[in-house]
């Protein structure tokens, strides 16, 4: 099986090209994702992404993303930038703007070319929804405070209360603003948030330290993949949470461990994300 390893700011995925030929059946995909993502017994990645022909007539491509634990996510911001570069480089489109069908709806990447090479990708990530944990709020995100207290079991019978903002970018995110992001015990808190009963679909969690009205530092615990160097949908969720709580403006550089993403919450309610997409390797996966 041919796989392409790519990353967006160190958030790495193995891409299976379903434009070039058939892909394995649905029932084997979770196990395939777990196997290839394994950093010791597999290739090593944060998950597996399938590049597929669209089902929807409006779209040119379809993306499916599986986390490292085999669970399927609705969307992947870093992954879709990589997918956009890959389909262009393989000649599946000559357009620099196109529509990708995802489980979070139609997503629109736009390529930035320099001398014919994809240098960066801006993605219209759609309209966020503010939520209160398991209880979605009606209507699109609005400019009002949506911070809610959340009691989180932090081990050995103890619990701590955090003030959180839950944002859906098609996939679920929980944003926690902190004074010092380096002081956060991600290994302990990440799983406690991910499996909190307030989030029956589990959740991606982002600890965010505001450095200024247009700069935020973030550490990420991803649903199904654990700590990652960056999360594109998460960076959008952080920017939305920053803006609705009055901590930031609507244009924010989100500094992740793997590097920065530029996020803008447009006046029309859509969130745009700009960042890089890089190749790592072409791989023949042949376990035996
Ligand atoms: N890394 C991604 C998000 C991948 C899916 C996520 N773990 C989920 O289950 O929702 C990104 O860049 O957005």
Image: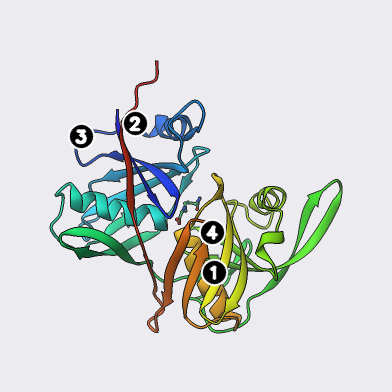
Residue 21 image label: 3
Q: Residues within 10 Å of mark 2 (few under 14, many from 20)?
A: few
Label 1 sits on a secondary structure element that is helix
Are the residues tagged 2 and 3 within 8 Å (C-beta)? no
CA gap between label 1 and label 4 equals 12 Å
CA gap between label 1 and label 2 equals 35 Å
Q: Is mark 4 within 8 Å of ligand 1?
A: yes
Taking depth in this image into account, of 54 and 91 the one nearest to the observer is: 91
Q: Residues within 10 Å of mark 1 (few under 14, many from 20)?
A: many
Question: Residue at point 21% right, 42% down?
Answer: 19
Q: Sequence order check: which comes first, mark 4 or mark 3?
A: 3
Asked which quadrant contains residue 103, the reply is bottom left
Q: Which residue is mark 4?
A: 172
Point out the frontmost of discs 1 and 2. 1
> In the rendered image, which quarter contains the N terminus?
top left
Point out the frontmost of discs 2 and 3. 3
Q: Which residue is mark 2?
A: 25
Q: Residues within 10 Å of mark 4 (few under 14, many from 20)?
A: many
């Amino acid at each position: 099986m041919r796989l392409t390893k790519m990353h967006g700011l160190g958030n790495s995925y193995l891409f299976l090209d379903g434009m070039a030929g058939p892909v394995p059946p649905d029932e084997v995909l979770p196990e395939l994702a777990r196997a290839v993502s394994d950093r010791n017994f597999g290739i090593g990645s944060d998950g597996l992404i399938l590049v597929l022909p669209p089902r929807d007539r409006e779209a040119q491509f379809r993306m499916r993303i599986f986390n490292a634990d085999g669970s399927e996510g609705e969307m992947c911001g870093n992954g879709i930038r990589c997918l956009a570069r890959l389909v262009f480089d393989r000649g599946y489109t000559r357009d620099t703007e196109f529509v990708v069908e995802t489980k979070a709806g139609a997503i629109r990447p736009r390529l930035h070319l320099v001398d014919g090479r994809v240098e960066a990708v801006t993605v219209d990530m759609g309209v966020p929804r503010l939520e209160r944990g398991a209880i979605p709020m009606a209507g699109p995100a609005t400019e009002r405070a949506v911070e809610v207290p959340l009691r989180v079991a932090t081990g050995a019978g103890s619990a701590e209360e955090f003030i959180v903002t839950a944002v859906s970018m098609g996939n679920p995110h929980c944003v926690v603003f902190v004074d010092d992001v380096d002081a956060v015990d991600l290994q302990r808190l990440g799983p406690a948030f991910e499996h909190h009963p307030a989030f029956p679909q589990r959740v991606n969690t982002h600890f965010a330290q505001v450095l200024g009205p247009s700069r935020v530092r973030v550490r990420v615990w991803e649903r199904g993949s654990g700590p990652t160097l960056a999360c594109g949908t998460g960076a959008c969720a952080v920017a939305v949470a920053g803006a609705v709580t009055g901590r930031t403006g609507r244009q924010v550089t989100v500094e992740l461990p793997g590097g920065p993403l530029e996020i803008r919450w447009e006046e029309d309610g859509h969130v745009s994300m700009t960042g890089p997409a890089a190749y790592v390797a072409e791989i023949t996966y042949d376990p035996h």
